[in-house]
Amino acid sequence: MGTLAYTLRDTAIRLAEVSTTPRLDAEFLAAHALGLERSAMLLRLTDLDTPPDLAALTQRRLRHEPVAYITGRQAFWDLDLVVTPDVLIPRADSETLIEVAIDHFKATTALGQVGPARILDLGTGSGALLLACLSAFPEASGVGIDASAAALAVAQANAARLGFAARLHWLHRSWINADWSDDLGRFDLIISNPPYVETDADLDPMVADYEPHSALFAGSDGLDDYRILVPQLASMLSPGGIAIFEIGHSQADAVSDLASNAGLSTEMRRDLAGKPRALRFSLGIGGMNG
Ligand code: GLN
């Protein structure tokens, strides 16, 4: 034990074995053990003592458990979300989808059209994408679908905590069933981060051993869920509506082909690391672009 400044340094050195962000991890774990926000802790580093629980939390991280599951929190867009092992941990990569949505509707608003009124999130998990959209588009209401009841409970709790519950509707259903979308109506914005990892992909143990496999894996080429969903999008979009899907960085061509076979045009957006990360589908003429 001893001063926190020293312990953080020591903890970060140990976490470097399992993490690419060891100092940040150490800070989040210590702040969690202290019951403080990380920023508040950092301002008081020299007068805080090492919290007794930090050693146990560090041991968990050394066994590859993600920080977000240890602390139960993850920041996404402008939101502070609760996460549990029932949901995929929201990633900064996925914020690319929110940027695409905002850019699209900013452009149409300039043409005198309104933002999205109805938003659908396919495989909502923690609710990250849908809640970020409601935050970005104050006039919109949303429907979140997930095949996992446990995930929906997390999404619902996040919506309630953040004050979005009245604008949302949650449905426990799976697109494996043919009639899953019959009663949904049409949407101005459909957003999705479906499972897209190849079944035999060599994932980091932090992901493979802790995150829900149903949210990750999608068949031998990772395209199973796109094959089901993309052909159905045209009949679910309102006139002028768009769908924005996250993709694995090597899947842009394959998923764009599915879209063009379904009569959709596609535009690709890269994430901050420069990797293809989001595809925007719209009705109408034109091919892949970008
Ligand atoms: N981006 C996640 C990963 O590779 C996968 C998310 C997903 O399958 N939708 O860790």
Image: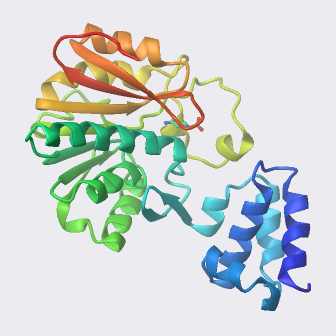
Answer left or right for 81 relative to 245. Answer: right
Kindly give the residue lying farthest to the front in the view shown.
110
Q: Nearer the viewer, residue 215 or 244?
A: 244
Q: Position of residue 68 (x, y in %)?
A: 61, 60
The one of 12 and 267 positioned closer to us in this rendering: 267
* 73 shown above or below 217: below
Rendered view: 166 above or below 21: below
Indicate the quadrant containing the N terminus: top left, top right, bottom left or bottom right: bottom right
Report the residue at 37% width, 61% height from top: 153
Q: Which quadrant of the figure has residue 38?
A: bottom right
From the viewer's perspective, tell me whether residue 87 is left or right of residue 188: right
Q: Position of residue 155 (x, y in %)?
A: 37, 59
From the viewer's perspective, tell me whether residue 70 is left or right of residue 141: right
**Is residue 160 placed above or below 17 in the rendered structure?**
below
Q: Quadrant of residue 42?
A: bottom right
Q: Nearer the viewer, residue 183 or 78?
A: 78
- Colour convention of the picture: rainbow
User: How far across and how far down the image is residue 122, in percent?
Assistant: 32, 40
Which quadrant of the figure shows ligand 1?
Answer: top right
Residue 93 place in picture, x, y as percent? 52, 41
Is residue 59 found left or right of 35 in the rendered image? Answer: right
| Residue at 16% across, 46% down | 115
Task: Give the number of marks.
Answer: 0
Q: Which quarter of the rendering shows the C terminus?
A: top left
